[in-house]
Image (tube, coloured by chain):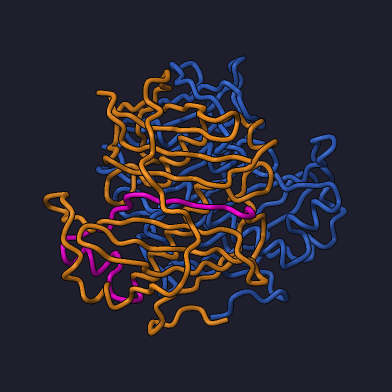
Chain colours: A orange, B blue
Amino acid sequence: MKCDDVKDKIGRYNFVTESYLVDFQGMIPIPMLGNYLLHAATEHAEARGFGYRAMTANGLAWVLSRIDMEIIECPRMSQQIAIETWVEDVNRLFTTRCFTVLNSNGKPMAHARSVWAAIDLATRRPTDLLGRADLIAYIDKEKECPVAKGGKVLPAEGTPGIPYRVKYSDIDVNRHLNSIKYMEHLLDLFDIGKFKSQRITRFEIVYTAEGKYGMDLSLHLKEVEGDTKYLASICDSSGSAICRAAITWV
Amino acid sequence: MKCDDVKDKIGRYNFVTESYLVDFQGMIPIPMLGNYLLHAATEHAEARGFGYRAMTANGLAWVLSRIDMEIIECPRMSQQIAIETWVEDVNRLFTTRCFTVLNSNGKPMAHARSVWAAIDLATRRPTDLLGRADLIAYIDKEKECPVAKGGKVLPAEGTPGIPYRVKYSDIDVNRHLNSIKYMEHLLDLFDIGKFKSQRITRFEIVYTAEGKYGMDLSLHLKEVEGDTKYLASICDSSGSAICRAAITWV
């Protein structure tokens, strides 16, 4: 299996899931699946000249704005998976990057679409991506991403919040709350019984502001459709959402 | 570089540290270093016939009883590291497994010694390891592990505790608080300023009981020697420690 050919628009990365990273049912949790996707994205961008190193050297950083994941079958312990990732589109402020997670027989287990901005590290403002020929050259509009495009995620604010203070282990190299940790804290709002009787088929998360060390946040969860559709959000101390999620279970 | 030859007593595993796993200073946090060590241990045991799969098939599980880590230089972002691991000794109830973390020039960055019991999954009691010829055959007494043997870790209990309830994301496939999560919760007791001005040179942790989902725990931290030596512990709701740690900073 070809691992990663820089001439290709699509990068392919192999992983073997590890026993200490699975949840109590031996399944890869959504945040860990997110980690694999981000790892594939990092490698893909790095090999093509628009990764962390190149961006940092130019005073820029990629910031994840949203990700919509659809899970057909959750990867299990010690399973070999491959992740394909490619740039789906680039517009002025955002680029979309898609993912397919495949099992060892090449059967899709999950799909995802992510939206990224390139911020200026000094001003923290998004930069214009239409000038980036290096990135645009890699757009692949032919490869299909079957994830339904995510719309506005409605608020879960207004429900009673569970307090959470941002800790050392939550902070990434950009000195902000790690994107994956937002997912982890929101999923922790569900009782473990939920994970035993149902599974997540769609997880949408929209990041609107950066969580910082020591911030006092509140975590909110709201059931919207029986026991299958939930909204969740993380708010800062003024009550403004710094992220919102929509979670679908079957 | 040889990756892993099952004839060898010493296994060697290569990792490239990933950007989303480093802390706010671009350094691999102690819990993540612990993850790498456990991964190397898992692979080493699996390839030699006494890993998770073989154990589970026999109704057994390896349980980490303690780990003593000495860090010379913390691995940084996107760095290539290799981890060597081997079985140092086996006695009736425990086996000791050592580790050396090497940089790409083969220079040691960290050493660790871990102590494991093999419990019977039905009774949760430790089993006799002296009958395990498969494990004993791999003892390597020649390879040196320069980690000072850990003694009793004194209690931090008695200090005011910070409450913590065990969540979905804390639970591993054995349905108990993940060994690495204990480390994470204890390190989160330190202010981020500590990580800016000092670094951890020795981290000892002793596990005495299993944390379970929903348990109400308390986290304790006690300064014992200026700003360099600390004790930390996690207690259950009766006040008994389920783990104790000693952390040395320079």
Residue A218 x, y percent position in the rendering: 37, 25
Q: Is residue A22 above or below residue A132?
A: above
Tell which residue pokes out farthest to the bottom in this image.
Answer: A7
> Is A179 situated left or right of A192 in this image?
left
State the image coordinates of residue A19 (x, y, percent, origin top left). 64, 53
Q: Residue at x 67, y 71 (%)?
A: A105
Q: Residue at x 78, y 42 (%)?
A: B119
Q: Nearer the viewer, residue B102 or B60?
A: B60
Q: Residue at x 54, y 40 (%)?
A: A248
Check if residue A101 falls in the magenta segment. Answer: no
- Nearest the viewer among A60 and B95 is A60
Q: Residue B126: x, y in percent?
A: 79, 40
Q: Considering only vertical position in the picture, is B109 above or below A160?
A: below
Q: Position of residue B148 (x, y in %)?
A: 53, 49
Q: Is residue A214 left or right of residue B63?
A: left
Q: Is residue B209 above or below residue A110?
A: above
Q: Residue lying furthest left in this view?
A: A123
Q: Quadrant of residue A181?
A: top left
Q: Which residues are magenta?
A: A46-74
